[in-house]
Image (cartoon, grey):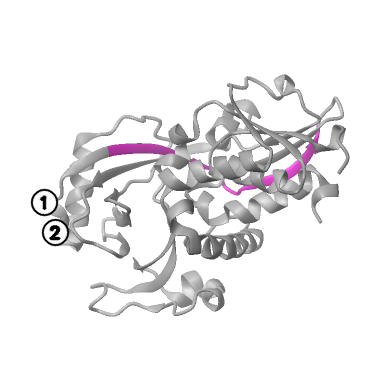
Amino acid sequence: MESGLNNDVIVVGGGVIGLTTAVVLAERGVRVRVWTRDPVERTTSAVAGALWWPYHIEPIAAAREWALQSLDVYEELATRAESTGVRMVEGVMGETELDNDAAWAAARIPGLRASTAQEYAGSGLWARLPLIDMSTHLPWLRERLMKAGGVIEERAVGGFAEVDAPVVVNCTGLGARELVPDASVYPVRGQLVVVENPGISTWLGSTGRDGEMAYFFPQPGRLLLGGTADENAWSTEADPAVAEAIVRRCAALRPEIAGARVLEHRVGLRPARDAVRLERELLADGRVLVHNYGHGGGGVTVAWGCAVEAAGLAVPAASG
């Protein structure tokens, strides 16, 4: 593309959605700047688990396509796990059935099957799926963007009028609640406990009869324990009682977790909405605003598919 109006894009938001979108644009020859309030290591994405899973995400048909596109990318990135932070790891999602929950993805997940009694005491699905170490993946995305000519600037945005570009991509997550403004965006608070890994190499997700979640994800040098999903809870401070309950629930699934040394406590606010907002808007001053937010806890699952669609909406001439 020739330099000029159409290849000057600012992506607002530096989490996994914003960085992935910026990477796709930059690698198509678009001049991209990312404006982020926080360094990538301090975004909500940095707190994530983060497992690719065929979650129920609205709008359903589009989200399934985004998820499968993203799966293709992660499978390739897993061949370079040390640099990308993406590994293919086996595990079980409890209280889940193939017919009801994941049949649409079965053709793309080799070996997806009902778990055995040895793998999980209840009913569940076994799968080998991408597990992303966000402490490696986010800096890798940043470096990939910069190698493609993109620029990252740490700055807060009070309104889109401040953004000096003909095309703006809104990847602000929970920040869209005030920035758009969009009152339908709300936080779903997640708390995790990071412990020394006592030798666990598989992931597991479980939901108890009381509705409480328990999950653990092995990451290099540590094990992430979760979790919570508290809607409209804004506190980012770790609650010691909640942390104790998380460890207790996970230890009920794998007793060796009970004695694992605690390394860190994490809290993140998932940017939830009744459906992902991914659409193009023409502002009154003639500029283009593309929205790509509201992914809740499924941002990693659909990140690359959403990025491709958002890039095409932002600069149609670069979509080929």
Judging depth in this view, the residue of 313 and 122 nearest the camera is 313
Residue 66: % across, % down: 63, 59
Q: Which residue is drawn at 27% across and 38% down?
A: 265
Q: Name the residue under label 2.
A: 256
Magenta-span inclusion, residue 28:
no
- Residue sitting at the far front: 147
The image shows residue 68 at horizontal and vertical percentages of 59, 65
C-alpha separation, residue under disc 2 versus residue under disc 1: 6 Å
Q: Which of 155 and 3 is in front in this view?
A: 3
| Label 1 Cα crowd, 10 Å radius (few <14 / some 14-19 / many 20+) | few
Q: Quadrant of the C terminus?
A: bottom right
Is the stretch drawn in magenta largely helix, strand or loop? strand
Q: Can residue 182 be seen in this view?
A: yes
Q: Residues within 10 Å of mark 2 (few under 14, many from 20)?
A: some
Count of numbered tags: 2
Q: Name the residue under label 1.
A: 259
Location of residue 156 (image quadrant): top right
Label 2 close to label 1 by CB (< 8 Å): yes
Name the residue at 86% across, 48% down: 317
Q: Give the range drawn in magenta.
A: 265-282
| Element at label 2 | helix
Residue 55 shows up from this direction: no
Question: To which quarter of the image does residue 152 belong?
Answer: top right
Quadrant for the N terminus, please.
top right
Q: Amino acid type of disc 1?
A: Gly
